[in-house]
Amino acid sequence: MPGIRIEDGKHPADETYAFLDLEKFKSGILTFSGGGISKVSFFIPEIHCTSCIWLLENLHSLHSGVIQSFVNFPKKEISITFRENEISLRQLVELLVSIHYIPEISQHSIEKSETQHTDKKLFLKIGVAAFSFMNAMIYHFPQYLPGHEFLETDIRRMFGWLSVLLAIPVLTFSASDYFLTAWKSLKKGMISIDLPIALGLTTLFTQSLVDIISGRGIGYLDSLTGLVFFMLIGRWYQGKTYEALSFERDYKTYFPLAVTKISENGNETIPLEDLNPGDRILVRNQEIVPADSILKSGIARIDYSFVTGESMPVAKQTGDFVFAGGRQIGAAIELIIEREVQQSYLTQLWNQIENPYMASNKLNTVVNRVSRYFTVIVVLIAIGSSVFWLLYKPEIALFSFTSVLIIACPCALALTVPFTFGSTIRQFGRKGFYLKNTAVIEHLSKVDTVVFDKTGTITNGLSSEIRFVGKPLSDEQVLAIKSLVFHSSHPLSKTIFNALEGDLLLEIVEFKEIPALGISGVVNGIRINLGSRYFVTGETSEDENLKTEVWVFFQDSVIGCFQLENEYRHGLQELIEKFGEKYELHLLTGDNEAEKTNLIRSFGNEKHLHFNQSPTDKLNYIRKLKKDGRKVLMIGDGLNDAGALNESNVGIVIADNVFNFSPACDAILQSKQFSKLYRFINFTHESMKIVKAGFAISFLYNLIGLSFAVQGNLSPIVAAILMPISSVSVVVFASFSVSLSAKRYRF
């Protein structure tokens, strides 16, 4: 659908939100701005049901300037990423207003008290509907008794008009959200799932007015007010269910991101939740800035591709403000935390990185299409049913029409996938397996090929035995080498750093880290290169030793190498055997063939083992597998494998004690859970079965409900009671089934 733009001067809210064009207001509202991409979060009280979530998360179809939008239902909050050159902040707010989702723009707009205020408004609507329903029932009660035809015409008409007075506030206040959402959606060329409800209410009210004016009766206003009352009760209950079983749609999971804090006692690795404003932190090469900060020292070149997609680094000077989500390129820098750390914000940033494969998320596409066309089909069935009964039994035509519209709400269908996959994400997160989003579950279930990296993936990079081969290092050389490797986040650099003695670190200039090759820098005027033999010496080796080597160039000559004896992760052999029964296995590594014999014993097929692979080689290899029709899972360490991880259908990073926050991957697995990876992936097939069962339950419910509704045997009030029950039952089924299956899998 082409973008729908709001032209200046044509929207009644133009002047209301003109202040958003002023820079001082924009800077206070935007959560990120850089490279033409901005992010903003709004509290929207009108978020009340699945229809709202669906519409707000499809804002990109209303305007091409919107990149992505995510709804946090319990908080009634939406986070939006947009291109400022296509839609301004002011126009974005006006777009939300135009579809009846008016953001509350204030410093406290997303606090809990606001949500409580919204709940009070819903309770007030329920109260108005309940009062009108009870009184309308009293007025309509005589017509359900024998002899009602003898009731005087004037009294009957008076009861009818009193019912109209009661129904008006119900329609204009209690049921206003249904009408506004349906109408605004239609104006934007979209069909909301509130449309059938709005049509049903309109039909009941119109028919009742005709009956009262013509003197044929007092209409069905008791059914109308009761219908609204029970739907609002269902909305409240559905919201509480959504909140209680929420899988945190804002992706605020137990994300394993740690940071190096600088204190008087030295550097220490702490989890993000222990970090506070004012704390000093160290960010090394290729590490993510975890919170909005001020640059205290060092040369900062910040890559914001994590947020904006633009990979050109931005230079920052001492005292400059650095947004969360940027990745440092170069030597380590020292930052002072300015704002409170929000893990949910970082995980939202992680989630917005586009993966071409995610565009073909077929299951979600089917759900969206079914939900949309389902509404159209339901309306057509309702019209056909009412026309049929008008010809054969006119007195039940109205009930049939309205009941069909109400009973066949696609809410249950729309909730099946998010709650099944969301509950799966929650179960995975508790066990140390963190997924980027729910789509990853479906992609994992389709994988048929598994590709492993070696160093830091199947080997334990933090516990290797290490020794230096060459002339013994002087204290000056040890200090210089330790100062250089301190700035790198590579597992081998960390191993060398931990093995060398000394606490003092020297200043590094001209620091560079070349993926799969090594690092380079100048210490006290001395050039030092560390890395592969080819990177340091320009030569290749045929040496068949079983150790990984890190060669050292110091000042003007090669002085030797560090030899690290690899230690494979616990449970590797059993894991590979299980994977080998179901998947085609491959190994890609930048190391030499020193351990080829050992790896052949584990992987079996020598043709699928590839050594001396550069990052480009790995990327091209994944592309070739995909071109051959394979669905590829890439498992790496997130450092030299970024291109391959991003190109694969699913990329998983193995994280050790200091967690690497890698936007190129789709999931992060704690290294201590490495042996359970097969069980995690196998569980995704169980999740898919639960989704299909949920679909079956939803369709079965609608078929049974429709069969009664089209016969006129189901009153609108009963339909209103059954509608939310169906949604809640699907939610409970999905969550309970996932929880039960997780216990059985014991991961």
Image (spheres, rainbow, N blue to C red):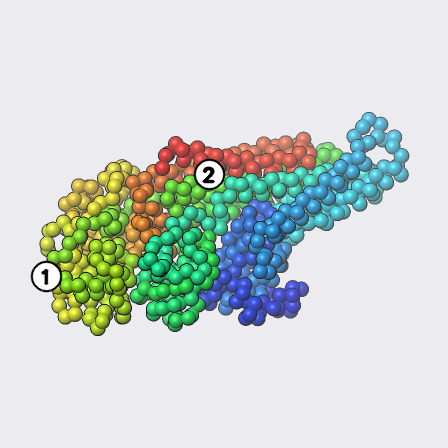
Q: Amino acid at mark 1?
A: Lys
Q: Is residue 666 left or right of residue 219?
A: left
Checking the image for residue 420, the label placed there is none
Residue depth check, mark 2 versus mark 1: number of the one nearer the observer = 1
SS under mark 2: helix
Residue 4 occupies quadrant = bottom right
Q: Nearer the viewer, residue 339 or 736?
A: 339
- Where residue 74 sits: x, y (%)? 55, 47
Q: Amino acid at mark 2?
A: Val
- Residue 351 in sight from this viewpoint: no
Q: Is residue 248 left or right of residue 316?
A: right
Residue at (43%, 64%) from the top-left corner?
Answer: 293
- Where residue 437 sits: x, y (%)? 43, 49
Q: Specify the quadrant that holds the C terminus.
A: top left
Q: Is residue 479 left or right of residue 244?
A: left
Are the residues at dot 2 and dot 1 in contact (C-beta closer than 8 Å)? no
Checking the image for residue 471, the label placed there is 1
SS under mark 1: loop
The correct choice, above or below, for 478 with respect to 430 in the image is below
Q: Nearer the viewer, residue 612 or 298?
A: 298
Q: Nearer the viewer, residue 400 or 192?
A: 192
Residue at (16%, 44%) from the top-left corner?
Answer: 598
Spatial distance from mark 2 to mark 1, Cα to Cα? Answer: 63 Å
Residue position for label 2: 691
Mark 1 neighbour density, 10 Å: few (under 14) some (14–19) many (20 or more): few
Mark 2 or mark 1: name the one nearer the start of the chain: 1
Residue at (29%, 45%) from the top-left corner?
Answer: 450
Q: Nearer the viewer, residue 717 or 138?
A: 138
Residue 98 occupies quadrant = bottom right
